[in-house]
Image (cartoon, rainbow, N blue to C red):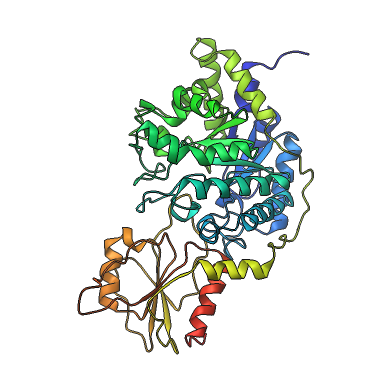
Amino acid sequence: MTAPSAEALALRVLLASFAGPTLPAEWRDLLADGLGGVCLFGSNLTGTRAETAALVDAVRSARPGALVAVDEEGGDVTRLHTGTASPVLGAAVLGAVDDVDLTEATGRAVGDDLAALGIDLDLGPVADVNSHPDNPVIGTRSFGATPDLVARHVAAWVRGVQSAGVAACVKHFPGHGDTAQDSHLTLPVLDADAETLATRELPPFAAAIGAGAASVMTSHLVVPALDPDRPATFSAPILDRLRALGFDGAIVSDALDMAGASGEGAAGRGIAEAAVLALGAGADLLCVGPDKDAALIREIQASIVAAVADGRLPLARLRDAAGRVDRLRVATPGTSQAGATIPAVPDPGRVRAAARGALIAEGTLPDLRGAVVVSVDTPANIAVGAGRWGVEPDLVVAPGEPVPDGHGPLVVQVRDAHRRPEIGAMLAAARPALVVEWGWPGPRTGWSDEGPERPPARICTRGNAAPVIAAVEELMREAGWDR
């Protein structure tokens, strides 16, 4: 048998993404030539489940061995349920409840959901310890702020999703939880010493590896204690640290179109050069990012081939990476079931109780008869993306806009208000009866507990999901809300 060429291997290590809900002809050609896989993003998932299943089948018809991946973390991050909110609880809620069996069942429910559509790689769960309360990109995607808590729930979620035949991709190594910047937009620095990294950031990844995680995703951030010069995705010392934890699966890069990897602050490198550097450092499967032209994928392929030809990238490293990608699956879901129904969530009564139990209620809820619900339309971070969040509002206002006077008690819904001074000013001016915080439960903003005006009652949800929305609605109805 003839060994695969560098051209073929260079495609096998790419997880790429096109725009739109149908497979373009030039992407069929990429798959036929050996493209490693396709990651589905928002622009690909605009139709019904039957249409999603048909798209997955089109990818597999072009290349039966292709991976199909998606970001389906549950809670705030869902690609399959943006119109209705995720049917399963998110990480922060699960961590607060601390029921490991429920977390494993939730991972299994997500795996069943993906497997029913033929999707075989889930870019989750998040293993970051959210130790920085102002973190703009992790927040409620994390199981919590302590390593032991995060470790046991990451391991449980991995066991659950992989029991459905869907490979997990644990992210973002070596840890994105103690940063105040978003690597989609800039190049963060994780400024912790080696001992802190070993005791705080790394235990959840070690637990995931112990649970058999099929893959681990890198982060685009600098960790001076391990490598002062290169972001983790391009750092052999950092990726070697992952291997030293006993991980022998596929190392997946975070999207190489992110600013932390290839933007202006990333040493001037473009996406194609970032791909070469990531492979050289030890990454195996390179995620390129959403809505890309086939021409860019061919450019990346050519850059990898050129790097092999000029000796910058050993052919043996490229072969090793492609081999790990080939072994990534934990099982093959097979042909998807067109129009497959959404698998049932585990034990609905238990889920409802967990969603209600994770709510933080501060102050006594006022009489909410005739209440008007206003949502402050803060944009979600790129990882979360657009989608349904919160109780269905009567009115939506932009951040910084005045909240109109209502004809009843005012309920204002916000996300991460503690990170947004303009929202604090809005709340202080509007004087709502109730604030519902759908982000990470940070400190109150806009009031002083010691001032003459006491702050309003507040509910902190620890993240969005359909069961959490139902729990908030139930609590509000108990206070008289009648919509």
Quarter residue 441 falls in: bottom left
| Image: 458 above or below 338 | below
154 sits left or right of 183 in the view: right
Q: Is residue 6 rendered to the left or right of residue 258?
A: right
* Residue 377 position in % (x across, y down): 40, 66
Q: How many marks?
A: 0
Residue occupying the point 74% across, 45% down: 57
> Residue shown at 77%/54% (left/top)?
338
**Is 417 in front, or is 341?**
417
- Image spot of residue 415 (x, y percent): 40, 63
Residue 458, image x and y in percent? 39, 73
Give the residue displayed 54% in from the left and 61% down from the top. Answer: 97
Q: Where does the N terminus fall, quadrant-wise?
A: top right
In the image, 155 versus 318, the foreground residue is: 155
Position in image of residue 301 (x %, y %): 56, 24
Whether residue 335 is visible to the viewer of this picture, yes or no, is yes
Q: Quadrant of residue 330?
A: top right
Q: Is residue 294 left or right of residue 173?
A: right
Residue 292 appearing in the image: no
444 over 73 or under it: above or below: below
Name the residue at 27% across, 62% down: 421
